[in-house]
Image (cartoon, helix red, strand yellow):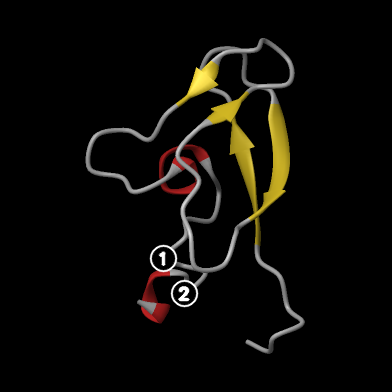
Amino acid sequence: MTAQEKQHSTITCPYCQATETLEIPRGSSQHLYRCRACACILKPKSGDCCIFCSFGDLDCSSAEQNLAA
């Protein structure tokens, strides 16, 4: 993966099933997300490091985000 390539994941709200595609931030985790459709706040499930791992179609480890540490 080159520096210009950006990884995206589609988050699906477990409450209303709305989806939104977000860029996975490099070198950090996103721990909170407010659904734009129903305004519920999503937090990672137990054992997951971020919202992408819990609710996304591509988790942060698949995007090699955790290898930089």
Picture quadrant where residue 38 is located: top right
- Image spot of residue 51 (x, y percent): 47, 40
Residue 34, labelled with which disc?
Answer: none
* Residue type pointed to by label 1: Ser
**Most extreme residue toward the left, as rendered?**
47
Q: Is residue 40 above or below residue 65?
A: above
Would residue 61 appear left or right of 30 to someone viewing this image?
Answer: left
User: Which residue is depicted at the point 61% across and 38% down?
Assistant: 11
* Residue 46 sits above or below residue 47 on the image: above
* 27 left or right of 16 in image: left
CB-based contact (under 8 Å), mark 2 and mark 1: yes
Q: Would residue 46 be found to the left or right of residue 12 on screen?
A: left
Question: Residue placed at 32% from the left, 33% from the top?
Answer: 45
Quick one: label 1, few (<14), some, or many (20+) residues within 10 Å?
Answer: few
Q: Is residue 11 above or below residue 63?
A: above
The image's mark for residue 64 is 2
- Say few, some or many: other residues with alpha carbon within 10 Å of mark 2 (under 14 / 14 to 19 / 20 or more): few
Choose between 41 and 52: the one closer to the eye.
41
**Residue bearing the label numbered 1:** 61
